[in-house]
Amino acid sequence: MVTGAATWTGGRLIQRLESLPEVEVIAVDELPPTIEVNSPMHDLAIDELDFAHFFLDTQPHVLIHLQAVDRAAILGREKSHSRVVMGARGLFGALQRCTGIEKVVMKSDSAFYGSGPRQPSILNEATAPKRTTSARSRSIRDVEGLLAEVALDVPDVTFTTLRLAPIIGAEIGNPISRYIRLPVVPTLLGYDPRMQVIHEEDAVSALLHAVATHVPGTFNIAADGQLYLSRVLRLGRRLPQPLLGPQHRAALRGLGTLGNRFPGSLEHYLRYGRVMDTTLMKDSFGWKPELTARQAVLTSYGRVTAPGTV
Amino acid sequence: MTDSMSLLLERLSRDELRAFARAAEIPGRSRMTKSELIDALRTELQSHSEPKRSKRSSASASEISEARRRRIHAGRRFDWMVDSRKSCTLRTIEGFACGLPAIAGRDRCALHGGTDISDLAVPAAGHLGIDTWPALLRHLLLASYDIDALGLDPVVSEMIWHIANFLYFEYFRVEVEGIENVPATGAGVLVCNHAGAFIPYDGVMLQLAVLNEADLPRRVRVVGTEILNLAPFLSHLYRKAGAAFASKEDARWVLNNGYLLGAFPEGVPAFQKPHSEAYQLRRFGRGGFASLAIDAGAPIVPVAIVGSEDVHPALFSSRRLAQLFKLFFPQQRVEELGVFLNPIPLPVKWRIRFLPPIHPPAPGPGTDRLTVLELAEQTREVVQAALDDMLEERGDSRF
């Protein structure tokens, strides 16, 4: 069963799952799908009890929970927060009662750690997240906390949580990809955040790897290398427009009314940046992304990748 | 060079030669004949063609020209590390060739994996100089190289190195002693006294001292507090120059990978010192550097810097100034700040002394919290003793 199947990541994941033999996919989402898939799509909101009952009726073997990160850009902050956290509560409750379930893979986000001036330069899985005001970070922490509680109650189930770096790509239409692909990019005057990214296909591969292998635990997932925002824009031949804090906020909001909605957490991210330690990803999770950060940025800008180059 | 020099000197009249000798401060010049003057001037000029350290404390014309020579020499002393006949093999995705010389014995240049950029700062073109800037800017614009995990940008840091060498050699005229105490390989913690007021030139000079004087240009990853992430414009420059954030995670990353960590354990309280208390070390924090050194088994190199605390002499320390500062940076923890009047730094002469390393005890059941505090206090005493010694040597001549 895949929740949050309407997103680009969900759709692409289902497409790749369908190509595997002996896999039956049950897709759940209340939004219209981004990518058309063959599997049936069930129109259920995860924070309603109907969904929990549907979950118990279908008795899936594997749950891929993609809707753990809020969709503030689509649903608005309050609604999205309550949906994600309450949805996780109901879903994990059903999980305790369900007998057939073997594995839970949850897509979390590096926003778990938040962004701030007191953060260490490299965040590992054990780093305690700092106090934050961002609704996005809070909801992710709440959901991960709930998951940890449930994991104690059902010891037979494998729980894998992937904290993905911001996903970028030419096809996925998430806020950060839209942001860096703007023709003129509003940046914060005097700040140049460090960023870590992962290519959209690599993100899907990481989720598939978690489904296919037995790797319990929480892992940071990101492409090799990190980039300053200024370098990302230089690679994309985009023009940065440095703005003061309030102007920057106004510019992002202005873009929001034009149809490009950005979550509030993006502003903190663009000031302080965030970089995770991916040692566990390579050692314990046993997986490596195909594209480096630089390649991911270039391909997401649609620039040519010649073979045999770095 | 000597031939052309004597030809030049012989063409000058005796009065001109004497004026020359006066500038060079040659003793007994008024009684010398023309040929004696020529000889004296020639020996004086030849003695300057080799880089050496000046013992004088005030900046005379010859000292400034010598400082300039030292600066240029320091920029060229890594020529041997690159192979100028061989080009780096890297081609970017877009198809651009690198064009920089490869590191001797390797296929790649300093930017593209020829050396470990987190540890060694080998100038990308083999030397520092304005002539290398076009190539550096090209790579900066192409973003063809990787930055390291803490955000070090080898190109930006090299540009800063090149510019800040002016401060190091010609403005502060830094003299370094005991550079051999800095470990040539592997981890090490440089523990240093922090300057009295506001702008931390000492962090930059500590980095430059190791880059310019040690056998290998090792980077010192200096740690800084929140202000490192908060200050606009400076925050990302600090990072690109190789600074780390004062946290256990960053410091462990530096030490476990075998790099040099530069710590100022006095921390923010150092900014509260009025100038009357200059060079009186404050408490060495909670001894975090000591526990990190024990865990990593890294030697502690105490460093004493004289000069840094006279650059901006603070008249008194003020709570009001700290409040004003907090208005702009509410997240920085600071109670008081030193008040100084000079907007530009005073051109005081700096001395940096690296002291023999202290090897921490092996981690185990015997190393408790008290051991950590004792080690921190031992380091503090060593630095304080060296400071007192150097201040006595300096006497009244600050410039």
Image (cartoon, coloured by chain):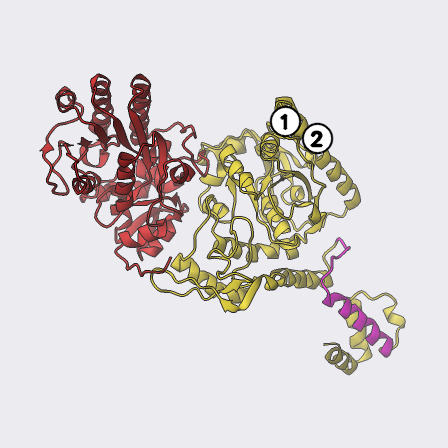
Chain colours: A red, B yellow
How packed mark 2 is, by other alpha carbons closer than 10 Å (few <14, some 14-19, many 20 or more), is: some
Secondary structure beneath disc 1? helix
Q: Give the residue type that dot 1 points to.
A: Val
Q: Position of residue B71 (x, y in %)?
A: 64, 60
Q: Are marks 1 and 2 in contact (CB under 8 Å)?
A: no
In the image, the segment drawn in magenta is B35-57
Q: Give the residue type that dot 2 points to.
A: Gln
| Image position of B331 (left or right of A78) | right
Instruction: Please report, as a chain letter, where disc 1 is located.
Output: B
Residue drawn at (66%, 53%), measured in percent from left and top?
B213
Give the residue pinned by disc 1: B372
Q: Nearer the viewer, residue B309 or B187?
A: B187
Q: Nearer the viewer, residue B304 or A288?
A: A288
Q: Nearer the viewer, residue A277 or A233?
A: A277
Residue B166 to residue A12: above or below? below
Extreme residue toward the right, this view: B31
Q: Position of residue A126 (x, y in %)?
A: 43, 29
Give the residue pinned by disc 2: B378
| Image position of A260 (left or right of B14) | left
**Quarter of image, res B7:** bottom right
The quarter of the rendered structure image containing the N terminus of chain B is bottom right
